[in-house]
Image (spheres, grey):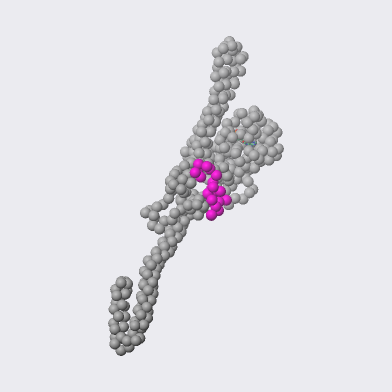
Amino acid sequence: MKENPAAFVLFSCILTFLIGMFAMLDYPLWSFPVTVVMSCLIFYMYQNSTRVLRQHQVTEPKQDAIKQEIQETYNTKITYQVVKGLLNILPSPYILIDRNGRLTFINAEAKSIVPDSQIGSHISNVFRSPVFLSAVENAIHKDKEKTLSFEIETPQFRQLKAHIFFISSSKIPNSFNDIFIQFTDESTHIRSEKVRTDFVANASHELRTPLTSIMGYIETLQGHAKKDVKMQRVFLDLMNKQAGKMERLISDLMSLSRLEIDELKPISSTCSVKDIIEELVNSLKPLSIDNNVSLSFKIPKNLSSLLGDPSQLRQLFSNLIENAIKYSGKKSKVNIYISKEKHKDMFGVVVEDNGHGIAPEHLSRLTERFYRANSNTEIEKEGTGLGLSIVKHILIRHRGKLQIDSKLGKGSKFIAWLPKMKKTS
Ligand code: ADP
């Protein structure tokens, strides 16, 4: 009856009528107004009860809905925290943005790409690329996922690939509405591709230059110098020099490629630094005399042995000592000794000269392939620009490192740090 107001009205009316009838028998005068007042009272009660009933009927589902909403928000929050936690440990850069284009999350990897970004900032304040921003707009307003490449200039140039996507609630229950953007930094790949193409271009250029000279001399020998014996001797001498240059370049290129192949191969042989340097100093004496450079060395016998590839270490020290003789200038002194600087597990072999020195802007680039500090001088033309790059690779293979200290007009110090041999008991 509570659910059926019509039955309630009928029942109340019958009850009122009966009470009225009974009352009329005893009190005919009062019975009519009493019946009317009671009817009103019953009607008022009915009204009230149906209102409360109606209210109750409306409020209960509403409360359930609110409860459900709270539960869903709570679940979404939990999901959000889980997703954020996962994105934080992923090695890829990730950001999340809401449907207003504002940053709601950025993981550590993405922060390294855009360190100035703040949660709550609009995406257009974080990235300036129009192609990227229009893809984000399409994602926000048209739910369009997209993968695209774009560049950023600040804080440093990067080539980025962005994958803009959503995660629907069918994939993750209680998922939220945010848009996911995953980045891939393609700069390293592009840079290494550039290094490779530069290397091929440089190597071909360096080989073509002496080859072109040789071809020119051959043409002259076949032409107007055909019968001139004196000229023939001069040209053959020049051709020999150019061929020697080509040979050095090819041998350096082969050394580099061998070193790259062997880089991870463990070294099992031992050798004596003192013996290698002594032998080199003797063989380079003629070069030092030609260049009017005094050459001396002082290597103690007790640290002479180390775990190393003898032919590679010979090449390493030969490149450093030859450079010191070639580039330090006439009347300079080249000394080879063990560094007094203490390094826990390493010792440093110093090749020092008191020559021209190297300008600071070149220092960090000296071990790049084909890099020369001053490519205009005659001496520079004799080099291949690969010597220090080979030194670096040999040291990498030996788990060592190269230190270069130089001052213009004062001279240079090249220190090859090598691991000490562990004592076996
Ligand atoms: P290169 O075949 O030209 O000698 P390297 O890689 O051995 O190539 O050396 C790179 C450059 O470093 C040289 O061209 C030279 O400008 C500079 N350099 C190397 N050693 C010295 C030194 N001892 N003094 C001055 N400059 C040096």
Q: Visible in this render: residue 228?
A: yes
- Relative to 345, 264 lies left or right: left
Q: How far across and how far down the image is residue 386, in percent?
A: 56, 34
Q: Visible in this render: residue 353?
A: no
Viewer-proximal residue, 82 or 104? Answer: 104
Q: Quadrant of ligand 1?
A: top right
Magenta stretch contains residue 121? yes
Displayed quadrant of residue 243: top right
Specify the quadrant that holds the N terminus: bottom left
Q: How far across and how far down the image is residue 4, in percent?
A: 30, 71
Which residue is located at x 47 percent, y 42 percent? 148
Which residue is located at x 31 percent, y 83 percent? 20
Q: How many marks?
A: 0
Which residue is located at x 55 percent, y 40 percent? 392
Viewer-proximal residue, 224 or 317? Answer: 224
Viewer-proximal residue, 366 or 136? Answer: 136
Q: How far across and how far down the image is residue 355, in percent?
A: 68, 36
Magenta stretch contains residue 30? no
Residue situated furthest bottom in the rendering: 26
Viewer-proximal residue, 344 or 287? Answer: 344
What range is drawn magenta here?
Answer: 111-134
Q: How far across and how far down the image is residue 80, in percent?
A: 45, 58
- Relative to 303, 55 lies left or right: left
Residue situated furthest top in the rendering: 227
Which residue is located at x 57 percent, y 18 percent? 217
Displayed quadrant of residue 60: bottom left
Residue situated furthest front in the rendering: 29
